[in-house]
Image: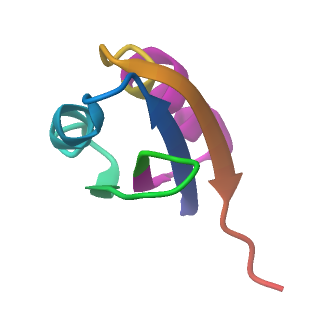
Amino acid sequence: MVQAYILIQTEVGKASTVADLIGKISGVVQAEDVTGPYDVIVRAQSDTVDELGRMVVAKIQQVDGITRTLTCPVVHL
């Protein structure tokens, strides 16, 4: 199982809508709007890194109102 945090910047006023829409995507564990340099933080999981990448590019980045994403895979050291 691969898990990651996805940090998202949105257009002004779109954070809540973006978080709601992303929260409905399969593989998304949690999506919350936050304050600071990012507007939404998502916790996602998939079986492989490739599946995670496809989720981010084909589903999450396609949500209207997103301007930038940063994917941070979880590592267990």
48 is within the stretch colored magenta: yes
Quadrant occupied by the C terminus: bottom right
Magenta stretch? 41-59
Q: Nearer the viewer, residue 2 or 44?
A: 44
Q: Residue furthest right?
A: 77
Judge whether 50 appears above or below 58 on screen.
Answer: below
Residue 41 spot, x, y in % from top left: 43, 54
Please tell me which residue is depicted at 66% across the width and 67% down the height of the picture: 74
Quadrant occupied by the N terminus: bottom right
Please tell me which residue is depicted at 42% across the width and 45% down the height of the picture: 39
Judge whether 11 appears above or below 52 on screen.
Answer: above
Q: Nearer the viewer, residue 43 or 37?
A: 37
Residue 47 spot, x, y in % from top left: 51, 51
Total numbered circles: 0
Residue 9 spot, x, y in % from top left: 50, 34
Q: How is the image coloured?
A: rainbow
Residue 43 spot, x, y in % from top left: 43, 59
Q: Is residue 46 left or right of residue 64?
A: right
Q: Nearer the viewer, residue 24 or 26?
A: 24
Judge whether 6 appears above or below 69 on screen.
Answer: below
Q: Is residue 34 left or right of residue 8?
A: left
Write down the quadrant of residue 71 in the picture: top right
64 is within the stretch colored magenta: no
Please tell me which residue is depicted at 50% across the width and 39% down the height of the picture: 8
Write down the quadrant of residue 15 in the picture: top left
Please tell me which residue is depicted at 58% across the width and 26% down the height of the picture: 68
Q: Nearer the viewer, residue 35 or 59?
A: 35
